[in-house]
């Protein structure tokens, strides 16, 4: 039985029905992961996975595990801590760091019977939009190995698209789940901030980071949300929201759903006409199914990039300070330093990559005394205004529909050569993080060269089920999500 | 020229919650290095701080006791700096919206002056770890046990002019927090730490001079010495045409000097910003009302009551009420013995003596009020005299739970000698054996009576009632 013909939910059903064992499923994914040509994996944990799959299979047979994801193999972005499995955040500075604790999402996935097969490549510390800043080398786009898979959850999207896993967990700080999902033709969901625990997620920008699923379908994503969402005593920023009911909310009924299309998005310089056309066509598909689609205004769009990069870099500069060579991970060799400050300098200079250092410097600058008010405080004000403007939009609409990214996946090397263009390409995704909203990227077509295009649906805070249901409805009407890359 | 010293204090107080401020590790002092820590307080990747609400309660109650306004909506901020004792490389503190501000503390100083000290603000924060340097100076070992122990930092206004005000302030903070049960305030163990900001100016001037901040002062005695040294240093510097540099100075207890640590120019930029991992916290009206309702009686009110209701002298009342532990011993003993003067007597003479001369800390006193009251009953019944009583008290005070006052008196045969004939016999013997003294007495040197009393008491092992001895002696001498 080829599990790559299945969605995660179908795989779970097959295991429950005894058509397949958890061990067989793990074996297939492990073999695919080990043969993966996209460099999606940093670590494949074969032994742990097989031992775990056997234990899960026993629990399924004894009736202790009955959930829809029991026995399903998962791959996990490598900034999510996995007990006993090396966790690198794709950075040299973490060395062979192996956590002695699980991220809360891992505890919850394991309790639901998921089997972790490996850790996925990403931009170093999730800083980047291409997965090229990884210390472990760039991940490649399964649809065209000369192109990037997007980022920072490039491995999470590429592995699903390349059939080297069925489903994965990524993290989204400014689009890091949705944009690679779009570039790779898979489904990526970013939950409302505070819905999923961040405990054990190696922080990039704490006020923006959120863990979410990458899968083939919105319903797979909803099934994962049923497992990982909900208040966590280990994360004070998690919200007291109902933990489950995501999968049950997928009725596919979107009649009367009010969808706004921001005209500013379609006036953005650099927006690929094919992306514009396919995403507008997606809106028409939804309208044909009974949604009410209207043009709206998002007048703050030009401010989201600077606000985002100031807030994210500021928080990152502080979050990454703990990587100092004192306690764990990489430390520069003794010949390269004398004294404490020198050890810090040598370790951090060598241990961090260029993009990370750039953002640490930027963040340090905007928090410096004398500049704080001009940059960081102002960015927080912009954040407050953006939130308010979204509230105004959501007073009249249930969802916002727009592109995920202005273009399809760019060629490897192109973005890092023009970082300003790369930062600007985050324009449609970052405001969702700034306002803490739920957003999904679902495949909505291909450009002329056959590269996937995704459409983004954004809901108001805590309307995660509405967003997932709209994505699900779209997938009931289309088959873009059923097309797979032939990795060449 | 006459100079005035101007001081402000920043006092760090460790809160005595069972667990740390952002994780569930114990706050217990000591412990083998790195055994009281977890991934959260050692700042492991991906871990998050979760606020311990008990810390907020203790902090707010401290703020109320120091007459502060409470910011019911308050927030945490990150203070960023690199040091190996700070595993996250930032300390979670409160800069922009601390929980308490604009308080005041009334002081009654040793020389009898009443002074009011303003409290600028109080904020909550986490403590850092400790670095242990190897004997050979080539290796440093971080111990993260103290990381995340909750602190409040109490920032005063620059209202101190005299050292005795500083001492009175710190003594009052300790007493207040003891009564609240929120900290043990042991300066020697670092659970209360005071940094002194000090400047000098010509007397009468209203402008502030340039200040220095002194750190690493670990006792009240050290504070007195540090203030004396630093004020003298600044005055001499200015008088010799120099200029005080704004800087942080470290007090060296052994050398009895302060040394420059870092100047303002080299001051670190802490890049404070709002802590994104901890949502703003809200203290409800109900919580505030509850904290006010459970506020205990503090030293001043207690001392006043000891004076008005129990007839203690003001000075004694202040000393006993100044410590929760002394006050408790006093009140609980008196509740049984019902003789405040007698209880006061033994506390002010014996207990204070043990504290001052033998370094006994009030909180370490084990003496049970029941035992103390029983002892007082025995003294008042005249079964032992006061001199013998001191011996019994000392044994009882340092004895363990099994110490039995009655058994002790019996075992050591200490019960008073009220056998008049035995006293008469003893005095007769003393007189007979000391003809020289008798001669002196006869020649009018009546002071020699004391010698006879002393000799008699010695032979009776101190157990006789001195009054009875005096009476019998007077009769005996009359007959000479």
Image (cartoon, coloured by chain):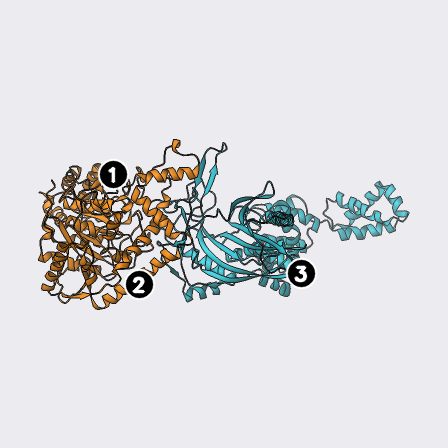
Q: Which residue in the protein does label 2 denote?
A: A385
In the picture, measured across the screen, residue A473 lies left or right of residue B64, that is: left
Disc 2 secondary structure class: helix
Viewer can see residue A269: yes
- Asked if B398 appears above or below B75 in the picture, the reply is above
Q: Chain of mark 1?
A: A
Viewer can see residue A67: no
The residue shown at (14%, 55%) is A273
Disc 1 secondary structure class: loop
**What colour denotes chain B?**
cyan
Instruction: List x then y, in percent, for residue B59.
Output: 46, 57
The residue shown at (72%, 47%) is B463
Chain letter, orange in picture: A
Instruction: Kindly report the distance in space between the C-alpha atoms of the residues bearing marks 2 and 3.
Output: 65 Å
In the picture, measured across the screen, residue B218 lies left or right of residue A463, that is: right
In the picture, measured across the screen, residue A356 lies left or right of residue B371, that is: left
Marks 2/1 same chain: yes
Q: Which residue in the protein does label 1 denote?
A: A136
Tag in front: 1 or 3:
1
The residue carrying pointer 2 sits among few (fewer than 14), some (14 to 19) or many (20 or more) residues within 10 Å by Cα, namely some
Q: Which residue in the protein does label 3 denote?
A: B313
Instruction: List x then y, in percent, for residue B273.
Output: 39, 54
In the picture, the disc for residue A442 is none
Disc 3 secondary structure class: loop
């Amino acid at each position: 039985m080829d599990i790559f013909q299945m969605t995660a939910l179908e795989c779970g059903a097959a295991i429950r029905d005894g058509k397949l064992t958890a061990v067989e499923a793990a074996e297939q994914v492990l073999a695919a992961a080990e043969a993966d040509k996209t460099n999606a994996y940093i670590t494949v944990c074969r032994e742990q996975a097989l031992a775990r799959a056997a234990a899960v299979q026993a629990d399924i047979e004894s009736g202790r595990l009955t959930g829809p994801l029991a026995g399903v193999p998962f791959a996990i972005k490598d900034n999510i801590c996995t007990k006993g499995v090396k966790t690198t955040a794709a950075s040299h500075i973490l060395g062979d760091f192996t956590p002695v604790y699980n991220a809360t999402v891992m505890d919850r996935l394991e309790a639901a019977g998921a089997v972790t097969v490996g850790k996925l490549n990403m931009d170093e510390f999730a800083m980047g939009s291409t997965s090229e800043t990884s210390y472990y080398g760039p991940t490649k786009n399964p649809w065209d190995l000369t192109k990037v898979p997007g980022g920072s959850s490039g491995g999470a999207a590429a592995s699903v698209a390349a059939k080297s896993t069925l489903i994965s967990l990524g993290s989204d700080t400014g689009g890091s789940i949705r944009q690679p999902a779009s570039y790779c033709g898979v489904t990526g969901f970013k939950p409302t901030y505070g819905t999923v625990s961040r405990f054990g997620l190696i922080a990039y920008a704490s006020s923006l980071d959120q863990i979410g699923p990458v899968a083939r379908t919105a319903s797979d994503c909803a099934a994962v949300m049923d497992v990982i969402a909900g208040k966590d005593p280990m994360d004070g920023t998690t919200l007291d929201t109902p933990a489950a009911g995501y999968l049950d909310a997928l009725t596919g009924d979107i009649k009367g759903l009010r969808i706004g299309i921001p005209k500013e998005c379609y006036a953005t310089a650099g927006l690929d006409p094919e992306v514009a056309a396919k995403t507008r066509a997606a809106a028409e598909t939804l309208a044909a199914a009974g949604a009410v689609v209207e043009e709206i205004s998002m007048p703050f769009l030009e401010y989201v990039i600077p606000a985002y990069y100031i807030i994210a870099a500021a928080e990152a500069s502080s979050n990454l300070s703990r990587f100092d060579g004192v306690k764990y991970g990489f430390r520069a060799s003794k010949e390269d330093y004398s004294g404490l400050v020198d050890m810090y300098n040598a370790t951090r200079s060598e241990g961090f990559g260029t993009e990370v250092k750039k953002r640490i410097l930027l963040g340090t600058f905007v928090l410096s005394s004398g500049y704080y008010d001009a940059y960081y405080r102002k960015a927080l004000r912009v954040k407050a205004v953006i939130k308010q403007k979204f509230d105004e939009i959501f007073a009249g609409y249930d969802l916002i529909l727009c592109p995920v990214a202005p273009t399809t996946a760019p060629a490897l090397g192109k973005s890092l050569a023009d970082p300003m263009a790369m930062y600007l390409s985050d324009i449609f995704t970052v405001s969702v993080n700034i306002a803490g909203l739920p957003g999904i990227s679902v495949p909505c077509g291909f450009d002329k060269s056959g590269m996937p295009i995704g459409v983004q649906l954004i809901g108001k805070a805590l309307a995660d089920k509405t967003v997932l249901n709209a994505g699900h409805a779209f997938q009931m009407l289309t088959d873009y999500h059923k097309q797979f890359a032939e990795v060449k | 020229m006459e100079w005035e010293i101007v001081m402000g204090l920043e006092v760090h107080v460790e809160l005595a919650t069972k667990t740390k401020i952002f994780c569930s590790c114990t706050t217990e002092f000591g412990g083998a290095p790195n055994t009281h820590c977890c991934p959260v307080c050692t700042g492991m990747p991906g871990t998050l701080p979760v606020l311990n609400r008990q810390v907020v309660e203790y902090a707010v109650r401290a703020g109320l006791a120091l007459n502060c306004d409470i910011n019911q909506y308050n927030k945490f901020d990150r203070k960023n700096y690199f040091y190996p004792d700070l595993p996250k490389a930032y300390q979670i503190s409160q800069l922009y919206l601390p929980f308490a501000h604009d308080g005041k503390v009334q002081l009654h100083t040793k020389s009898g002056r009443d002074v009011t000290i303003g409290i600028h603000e109080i904020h909550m924060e986490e403590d850092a770890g400790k670095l242990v340097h190897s004997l050979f100076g080539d290796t440093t070992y971080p111990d993260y046990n103290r990381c995340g122990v909750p602190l409040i930092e109490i920032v005063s206004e620059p209202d101190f002019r005299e050292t005795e005000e500083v001492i009175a302030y710190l003594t009052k903070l300790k007493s207040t927090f003891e009564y609240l049960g929120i900290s043990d305030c042991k300066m020697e163990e670092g659970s209360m730490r005071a940094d002194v900001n000090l400047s000098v100016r010509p007397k009468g001037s209203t402008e502030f001079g340039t200040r220095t901040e002194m750190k690493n002062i670990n006792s009240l005695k050290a504070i007195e010495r540090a203030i004396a040294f630093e004020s003298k240093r600044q005055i001499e510097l200015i008088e010799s045409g120099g200029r005080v540099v704004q800087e942080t100075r470290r007090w060296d207890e052994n050398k009895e000097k302060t040394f420059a640590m870092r100047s303002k120019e080299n001051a670190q930029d802490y890049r404070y910003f709002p802590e994104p991992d901890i949502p703003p916290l809200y203290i409800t009206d109900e919580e505030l009302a509850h904290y006010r309702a459970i506020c205990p009686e503090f030293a001043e009110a207690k001392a006043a009551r000891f004076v008005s209701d129990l007839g203690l002298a003001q000075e004694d009342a202040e000393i006993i009420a100044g410590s929760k532990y002394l006050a408790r011993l006093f009140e609980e003993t008196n509740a049984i013995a019902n003789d405040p003067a007698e209880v006061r007597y033994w506390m002010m003479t014996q207990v204070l003596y043990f504290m001052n001369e033998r370094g006994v800390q009030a909180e370490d006193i084990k003496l049970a009020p029941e035992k103390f009251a029983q002892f007082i009953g025995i003294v008042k019944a005249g079964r032992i005299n006061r001199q013998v009583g001191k011996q019994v008290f000392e044994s009882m005070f340092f004895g363990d739970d099994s110490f039995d006052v009655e058994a002790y008196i019996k075992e050591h045969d200490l019960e008073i000698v009220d056998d008049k004939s035995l006293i008469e016999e003893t005095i007769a013997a003393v007189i007979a054996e000391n003809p020289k003294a008798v001669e002196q007495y006869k020649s009018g040197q009546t002071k020699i009576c004391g010698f006879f009393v002393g000799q008699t008491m010695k032979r009776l092992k101190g157990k006789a009632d001195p009054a009875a001895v005096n009476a019998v002696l007077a009769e005996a001498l009359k007959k000479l």
